[in-house]
Each structure stands twice: as structure tokens, then as C-alpha cells.
Image (tube, rainbow, N blue to C red):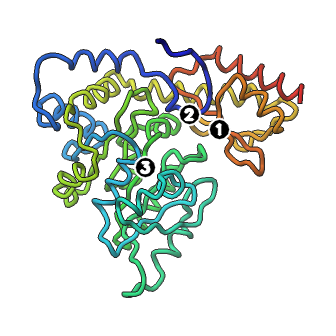
Amino acid sequence: MTATPRRGFASDNAATVHPRVLEAIAAANVGHAFGYGHDPYTQEVERRLATALGDPEASVFFVFNGSGANVLSLRAALHPWEAAIVSATAHLHTDEVGAPEAVAGAKLLIAETVEGRVTLDGLRRLVERPNDEHAVKPALLSLTQATEWGTLYSLPELHALAELAHAHRLRVHVDGARFANAAAALGVSLAELAAAARVDLLSFGGTKNGLMVGEAVVVFDRALVPGLLHLRKQTLQLASKMRYLAAQFDALLTDDLWLRNAAHANAMARRLHDAVAGIDGVRVTRPPAANAVFAVLDRTARERLQREFDFYEWDDVSGEVRWMCSWDTTEGDIDAFAAAIRAAVAAA
């Protein structure tokens, strides 16, 4: 039985696995190796990723998925009486089916959010309010870069938020499911982007950037490392055959594959934006900053399009949709989709 080929714009999770990632998995599939990350190969890949992120001494914990990476980060950083500050659109708040509360036992405080970004004033209002034994204590700021709205924090914005958080003794976590796309879009290295946020914990995404399965929790705050050794297992995120997760990151780091994949996805989003921005009946709601295009179009046109192409309806009320580009999106995909959009709008 074979899969039915289909091209779409639903998510970068829907994309194929990069051939070099598959080759790396096959190359690692030789002989026996200690499990649970205790093999020399996995440990070397951990060092490579830490170095790429600007701190060779940072600790790397490979996990299965982004939700696991985020929840594990909360469990490591928060005491039961403490809370994480997140944006109104953060995955931790909207897309993890209550896992922060159910698994981490964590309280989330929702900050003022503009275009997917936590505002400095919104953060200030939460960290500067009186705190006594009756109120949960903010102890972590979680930022998503790139955001769920496809927007980006600039480096000065990240720096200002991190400065305020650290001044009030909050750690900084970054949900970096699309961290590579953000770095590519901003024209900076992974290390520069991590340094701007003065990040203590980073959920570094791989699945959305060409991997089959796997994310990494990168820990810059040494005080959190001993607990994570146990929490990763307790959070059901410890792979027994860890070298196969590590192999995928090995491929991603080799010859800057992470950057080429992310930059291509971003470029395809810009191409899609340019192709549809002038179509009568299509209103692009914001210019693409990374690899997503958001637009509003008529329901009839949306339904017609979805017969052939997969994509998400972002807002049922406004009719806004999200079109996500991936490492394997081609110019032909963009041109065919743009033509289909034009035809669907015209028919509607």
C-alpha cells in the first residue's frame, strides 16, 4: 500500500522528510549503541547543537515532539506555586489540550498580545503587580519565535522583554518550533537569536524543518540540568534508541541544512504572498515574516479550494485562513495554488 501524493499548505508538519535526514537515520543504523542517549554519537550531536546555539556548555535533551518539549521546560522551570507568562496565541495556551496544567501542573498567565507577540507593557503589568501568598508568582516568560501568527520578535524586542523578565527573576523560555525560520528571516545565526532573548530554555524545533520526528530542549541555565535528567523520563519523552533522533539533528546541522530548509520555506511564503496579493477577493491580512501567509477570502472560495488543497481556516468568524509553506514547497506548488485561488475566487 502506498501513500497518495498530495500537495498542500496546511502545515510544515505535513511536509515530507528531507532525504538527507533519512540518509542520516540509515547511516546511524549500524551496529549496537547504548540506549537513552548514552552513546558517543548522540553526545557529540548534542555538543554540536549547543555550539550552534552559542553555548558549547549548554545541555541538550532530545525529545519526541514540541508539546513534550514545552511541557518539559515548564516542569523544569516552575515550582507548584509559580506561573508562566505566555501570549494569548501561544501553543502552550491554545494548542496543547491543557497539557501545561494537566501534566506540568502549571498556571499560565496570559499577557497582552499584539500580532502574536507579548508586549513589554503587558509583561510589565504582570511582573510588577503585588505578590503575596494569595497570588501565584510569575517565574517564567515563554515567547514563541516565530509566533503562531507568523510574526517575529525583532532582536531589540527580545532583548527588552528578556531584560525585564530577568530583572524580576523570571527565567526565559522560547518555544522555537520555527526558530530556524525566524533566524533565516532575520538574517542572524541561531546563536545570535538565542543570545538576543537571553534564553534559559529553548524548545528547538526540527519536525517543522525537515525532520521525521524530534525536537530538542536546550538548557542554558545550568541549575535546571539535574532535574531535567529525571523529568524527561517522567514526562515520557526519553527515547530508548536516542541515536535515531540525534542523527536527524546531525543532518540538520551539517552544511547549514537547517538554514537552507528554513530560508526556502520563507521564500516560498513570500512568493505566495506576491502571487495572491493582487487577486480581487483575496485580502492578505499581514505580510509574511517567516513561512506563513494569512488571508481572508469568501467561504465559497475556501470550500472550493479545499477540495484540492489542504489548509487551515484560522478564524471562522472573519474567514481568515493560514497557508503554510515548507522546506519542500516548490515554485510549481505556489503557481498552481495561486491559479486555483484565482479561479475559486472568480467562481465564488
Residue 40 percent coordinates (x, y) = 11, 30
| Residue at the disc numbered 3 | 175
Residue shown at the point (54%, 27%) measured from the top left: 326
Q: Secondary structure at mark 1?
A: strand
- Between discs 1 and 2, the one toward the N terminus: 2
Left or right side of 50 for 267: right
Q: Nearer the viewer, residue 194 or 174?
A: 174
Which mark is on residue 154? Answer: none
| Residue at the disc numbered 1 | 312
Tell me, yes or no, whether the two marked residues, 1 and 2, touch with CB atoms within 8 Å: yes
Image quadrant where residue 197 sits: bottom left
- Mark 1: amino acid: Tyr
Which mark's residue is nearer the viewer, 3 or 2? 2
Residue shown at the point (38%, 56%) measured from the top left: 173
| Residue at the disc numbered 2 | 11
Image quadrant where residue 50 sits: top left
Residue 289 percent coordinates (x, y) = 60, 40
Residue lying furthest front: 1
Left or right side of 53 for 342: right
- Mark 3: amino acid: Asp
